[in-house]
Image (tube, helix red, strand yellow):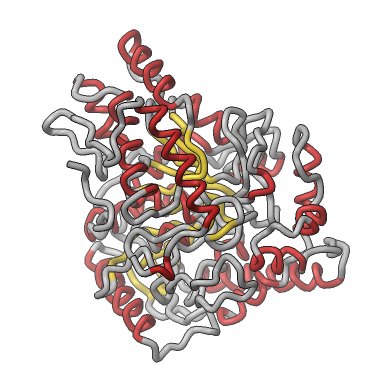
């Protein structure tokens, strides 16, 4: 590999630590080259779905221990060696013990729940009481919470196994942090994985875990999903509890699934959605959660739907004469024809008033961050830092992230600028409602990014303004600004093999409808494919 892309010192240290952890989990006999786990002849770990794994468990073809061993071998081969994706922050040291317990539960009483022994890659912004929670920062390298986040509790109650906490952009922005260095995109390890849930995205895409949890303030679920040929759901904000997750802007912060299929995203959403008294905003979800998001999905789910297509770029920095833009446009054109072929009534080139100012509206809100962060840190038992200001005064936060966070110091929701943001947000939301009503639309569709991911800058860890064109063509912000749910599904690939995501946006609490639309599109298009940098182990 070109020396300019070699990992930083802290990334190398992280790799050595995780390799030691894998050796301890799999046994001292692990050789330098990661061995393939000997699965039954008809079972393939790569691209396996929840339903396929459960069928293999029930038939005796596969054990939970074997499944976890398979993912651990792939983590060594591709995260720590090979393309060195650097997606894993901390492995669960009890993963194989938990797997053995789940095997015993299956033998004595059947599947323990809808997520029985499904290995989860969990963004390291989310608290676990048996693993460090670092937020991607060296400042919290040894911090272990005394509690599990609500989503963690709910996944465990459904039988899931937390395999690892994933690397993330420090304090939830971009794809680099002082804790573990930068994450690589497995479809081209020279390119960025989007952020800030880039570790979850790259890990699920490369089959280092089965499903993942990301966090989305301004696109951090859907961005990494789009550039990794994944399904990513940003739910309506009150649908999924944020209890146990470090906030950024509470009026747009949420969590959701990152998976390789729409069905798996629906199954995961079933497990985590619903009211949690620890996050009172979720009380708005009462009566809004169906019996199951995974029931009734069919290939004709788009038949009769009215879909509006947004073609106007939302990123004003984008060069619409660029080759990357033309490549993304070609994928949109093909998606529109696919929607029509699936029976949808398409209203093309829907005009949203002020669409070119959506990203600017989102950037107006730096008023919530300091107070929300300080209140969250005050809830923790003995954190190493207790305020956002003290975190920044440490001088150890990655320069780009430190610069961004510094802009929120001293700002409050009592500032006049916050009222300006709220008024602009509410006007945009009203405009989108009106456009959908005028055209009698069920959902809007657009690309997640109007451009493929850019190259990682050589100075991304040291420069407060790295020249990497990060987030070019970003269309993700209409969802958090309106507060509406959005589902990204694989839309296709550029001629260079880089994924482009297609995003469905719907009114509040229409996740079931979006999942139905996304499933029909996915089944017909079949665009999901794994990265060539992480092939099956043999």
Q: Residue furthest bottom?
A: 321
Residue 385 picture quarter: top right
Residue at 24% across, 36% down: 35
Residue at 59% across, 57% down: 177
Residue 212 x/y as whole percent: 44, 44
Relative to 276, 339 lies left or right = left
Q: Residue furthest left?
A: 41
Above or below, 65 against 401 in this view is above
Residue 235 x/y as whole percent: 53, 50
Residue at 30% across, 11% down: 107
Residue 222 x/y as whole percent: 47, 59
Question: Which residue is at the front of the view, 221 or 2?
Answer: 2
Above or below, 447 against 251 in this view is below
Residue 97 picture quarter: top left
Q: Is residue 187 visible?
A: yes
Residue 353 x/y as whole percent: 58, 81
Relative to 325, 249 lies left or right = right
């Amino acid at each position: 590999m070109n020396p300019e892309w070699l990992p930083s010192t802290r990334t190398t240290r992280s790799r050595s630590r995780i390799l030691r952890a894998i050796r301890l989990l799999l046994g001292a006999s692990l050789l330098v080259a990661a061995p393939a786990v000997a699965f039954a002849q008809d079972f393939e770990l790569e691209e396996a779905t929840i339903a396929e794994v459960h069928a293999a468990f029930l038939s005796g073809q596969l054990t939970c221990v074997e499944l976890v061993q398979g993912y651990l071998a792939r983590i060594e081969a591709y995260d720590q060696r090979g393309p060195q994706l650097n997606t894993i922050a901390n492995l669960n040291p009890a993963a194989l013990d938990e797997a053995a317990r789940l095997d015993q539960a299956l033998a004595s009483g059947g599947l323990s729940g809808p997520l029985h022994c499904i290995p989860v890659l969990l963004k390291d912004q989310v608290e676990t009481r048996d693993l460090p929670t670092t937020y991607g920062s060296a400042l919290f390298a040894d911090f272990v919470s005394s509690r599990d986040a609500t989503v963690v509790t709910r996944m465990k109650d459904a039988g899931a196994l937390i395999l690892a906490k994933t690397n993330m952009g420090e304090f939830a922005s971009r794809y680099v942090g002082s804790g573990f260095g930068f994450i690589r995109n497995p479809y081209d390890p020279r390119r960025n994985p989007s952020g800030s849930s880039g570790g979850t995205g790259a890990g699920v895409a490369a089959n280092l875990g089965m499903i993942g949890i990301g966090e989305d303030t301004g696109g951090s679920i859907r961005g990494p999903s789009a550039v990794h040929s994944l399904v990513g759901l940003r739910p309506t904000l009150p649908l999924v509890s944020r209890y146990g997750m470090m906030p950024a802007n509470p009026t747009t912060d949420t969590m959701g699934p990152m998976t390789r299929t729409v069905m798996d995203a629906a199954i995961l959403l079933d497990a985590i959605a619903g009211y949690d008294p620890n996050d009172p905003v979720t009380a708005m979800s009462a009566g809004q959660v169906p019996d199951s998001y995974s029931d009734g999905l069919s290939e004709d789910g788009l038949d009769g739907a009215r879909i509006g297509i947004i073609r106007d770029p939302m990123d004003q920095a984008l060069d619409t004469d660029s080759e990357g833009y033309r490549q993304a446009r070609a994928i949109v054109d093909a998606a529109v024809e696919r929607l029509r072929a699936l029976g949808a009534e398409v209203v093309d080139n829907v005009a949203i008033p002020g669409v070119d100012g959506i990203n600017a509206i989102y950037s107006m809100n730096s008023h919530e961050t300091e107070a929300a962060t300080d209140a969250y840190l005050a809830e923790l038992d003995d954190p190493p830092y207790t305020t956002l200001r003290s975190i920044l005064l440490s001088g150890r936060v990655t320069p780009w992230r430190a610069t961004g966070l510094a802009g929120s110091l001293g700002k409050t929701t009592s500032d006049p600028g916050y009222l300006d943001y709220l008024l602009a947000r509410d006007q945009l939301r009203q405009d989108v409602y009106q456009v959908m009503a005028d055209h009698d639309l069920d959902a809007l569709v657009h690309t997640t990014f109007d451009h493929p991911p850019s190259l990682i800058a050589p100075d991304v860890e040291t420069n407060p303004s790295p020249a990497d064109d990060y987030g070019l063509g970003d269309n993700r912000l209409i969802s958090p600004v309106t507060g509406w749910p959005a589902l990204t599904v694989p839309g296709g690939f550029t001629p260079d093999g880089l994924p482009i995501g297609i995003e469905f946006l719907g009114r509040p609490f229409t996740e079931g409808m979006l999942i139905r639309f996304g499933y029909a599109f996915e089944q017909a298009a079949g665009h999901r494919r794994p990265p060539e940098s992480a092939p099956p182990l043999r």
